[in-house]
Image (cartoon, rainbow, N blue to C red):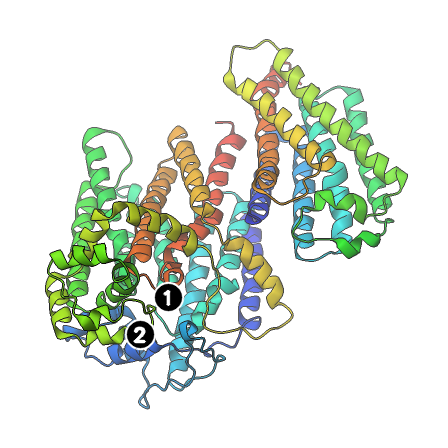
Amino acid sequence: MPYFLLFELVLVAGFISIQLSLPADKRNPSQTFLLFALILLGTGLVSELVLGFALDETAAKVFFWARGSLALAWFGQSLLLALFPNDRRIRWLSMGILAASLGLLVLVFLLHITAAVDWYSAVKPIYGQIGDLLATNRPARWGAIAMNMYGLVALIAGSAYAFFSRPHKPDPMRFIATLLIVLGATILFVLLYLPPKVSDLSFYLCELFAPVALFIGIREINFRYFEPLRRQKGQ
Amino acid sequence: MKKYWVILVCLVVAGLLLLIRFTAYEPIGYSISNYDTDAYIAAGRIPFFAAEFFTSNRPPTIGLLYKVLEPSTGYQVTALSSPAEDIYKPLAIQPGLDRVAFAQSLLSIAGWVLLAVVVARRLVNPGLQILAVLLILAFGFSPAVVEWDYILLSEPLSLSLFAVFLAISIELTPKLIDFGGDRNSWITPLVVGWFSVLVLWVFARDSNAYLLPIFILGIIALLVVQKIVKNVSLPKTQILVVGLISLAFLFLVHNFTFQKSDRWINPFFNNMIQNILPYPDRISFFENMGMPFNDEVLALRNTSVNTNKDQLFKIPELMSWLTSHGTGPYIKFMIAYSDWTIKTLVSGVEFSFSENRQPFFFPSSNQILPVLTYISDFFHPKTSSVVWVGLVEMVVLGFLAIYKKEAVSIGLFLLFGILFLGEFLMLIVSILGDASSIVRHAIGPVTFFRLSVWLLPMFILDLVGLHSNSGT
């Protein structure tokens, strides 16, 4: 079901449109990071679609940069900014994420395609092939791992914090949002580091589920719990 | 100011896709014929006001198109393909028929552009408006749809008319719900246009008529809801009753002319050769209903659907029995052999989605065609899973619309619900109604289900954005 890839791209493009049309009073650094995380994910999907047609060096690099290195970290930072909107350390971390993203962009575009080009298969997921395909130097490889680990930890720990730390009246959406974020983050991470070898239904469903879960989960936490709290504190 | 930027971007997107439509494919006016083309030409020569025009062996809308466009020099079939016999010819300018091909392409382009405009107008989110234009035109201008415009059969006109019908339905639905409040909403011309296009579409392919019973049931359901639930935004009772009567009348007229015509006999013979003659028990079943099985009929036992079928038309007692009994015996057979019917239907649904390109000609290769084909395969997946995806989308749209109490979205949900069920009924009729050319006959419902996958998320996301961004 390769059409799920385009379907996922359509959904991500729709989420981006929704983020872009946020009213001025709801725009905050967390929402901006969520917007860029979605743009990175969408960029990764576009490169995935291009790579499904034929091997293209630029598309492979874009995939490694946008999806393989950054998307998870930007989602994570979005959640942290929603949880701690006025924490200076989180703000500095945001600057760090931005700087690391730009640094990785330079590093990734210095990479080259390896001999794996000879056995590249357009019908197989790029996740399982990108490691062999790009001659990743250590800074690029470790940079990507660090960013993804940061994103995974931020999302899981952040959603757990959101669930346990603030006493509110019981609300099933709070549990659902936490669950969605944990599942979405785990799937995005697992797809990168336990890559699927074949394009089967489970692969496409995972690809589809992750952005939907993260979009709903992070926005839910942003709107329902921390936005009113922030307003209440006059922040 | 922002609105004009959105319109400008939509125009640029539409312009680029139109450029692809006009340059990446064969020139408009080129065409390919099939054996059926001759029958359409003949149908077009029957006087419009003669009853035979509606009861000939080809649907009247196609005959009307050929009648209106026929030049004084007439039509000449010079390029004929028959995939069943492995006869393939390249596209060509066929004298006279170039007008038909030209009209088919223009109507197709106009239909998809209209649908894109209407859907974009219906959406609130500017990004989604642009996305909708991109998706709908990419869908409608992909090889899976465009290539049909070059084929002189009923499918291209039926597909294009459906795009127009869907566009008018989407435009009309919210206006019907708001009817009474907004008198300047172009409702009368829209209703007239909607019904006119519906009539043309129903008479373009006989299986299209099976959308009508579902529409009728939908209106009856609305009337019941109107009686039970007060303070609900529904079209006025008078509109619903007029709609009900009009659609019921249209269905009866179609059914009457269809039964009077011999359009159903050819598919019946296909079914007979493939599904009845090879099985003695099924022959007995029809014999019990009085169907004559003489040696001439039984001689066709192990032939394929496309060979020697014409001989059946020359057996007077068989033709006499068929014309006096109509389609009833075959329906009784499907009910009696319900296991077989269900199995055939299940396998037929998957088979209907197994192809997404026309089989009549090989498009001339160019640099962009492989890319278009690659993209087209995403928009027109060769799997029936799109029905399930569409169903899930329908449920999500319905849930959100009802939960958010959005009258317009509820209206769109009802519209798509009716279309979903109606198109599925059409798919069933296409699979069980004719054992031959199932993929081609099912192209209408299959295209709708594929389109739904891309269309419904636009309405869902718009609803999500509208409410979540405003915090409701």
Q: Residue at x 44, y 68 (%)?
A: B148
Residue pictured at 53% horizontal, 66% vertical: B18
Question: The disc labelled 2 sits on which kind of residue?
Answer: Leu
Q: Nearer the viewer, residue A196 or B392?
A: A196
**Residue B34: x and y, percent?**
38, 76
Q: In which quarter of the image is residue B360?
A: bottom left
Secondary structure at badge 1 equals: helix
Nearer mark to the viewer, of 1 and 2: 1
In the rendered structure, the answer to whether residue B49 lies left or right of residue B432 reads left
The image quarter containing residue B98 is bottom left
| Residue to which mark 2 is pinned | B65
Disc 1 to disc 2, how far (Cα)? Answer: 13 Å
Give percent across and percent down for residue B95.
Answer: 40, 87
Residue B204 lies in quadrant: bottom left
Query: Which residue is labeled 1 in the image?
Result: B155
Crowding at dot 2, Cα within 10 Å, few <14 / some 14-19 / many 20+, comes out as: many
Secondary structure found at label 2: helix
Q: Residues within 10 Å of mark 1 (few under 14, many from 20)?
A: many
Mark earlier in primary sequence (1, 2): 2
Contact (CB < 8 A) between labels 1 and 2?
no
Question: Is B368 on the left or on the right of B314, as rendered?
Answer: right
Above or below A77: residue B218: below
Look at 18% across and 51% down and name the residue there.
B332
Q: How many marks?
A: 2
Q: Where is residue B463 in the image (x, y as percent from the top left)?
A: 46, 37
Q: Residue B334 carries which label?
A: none
Residue B68 in the image: above or below residue B274: below
Whether residue B250 appears in this view of the structure is: no
Circle 1: residue type: Glu
Q: Which of B196 and A181 is in front in this view?
A: A181
Q: Position of residue A34 (x, y in %)?
A: 66, 33
Q: Which chain carries label 1?
A: B
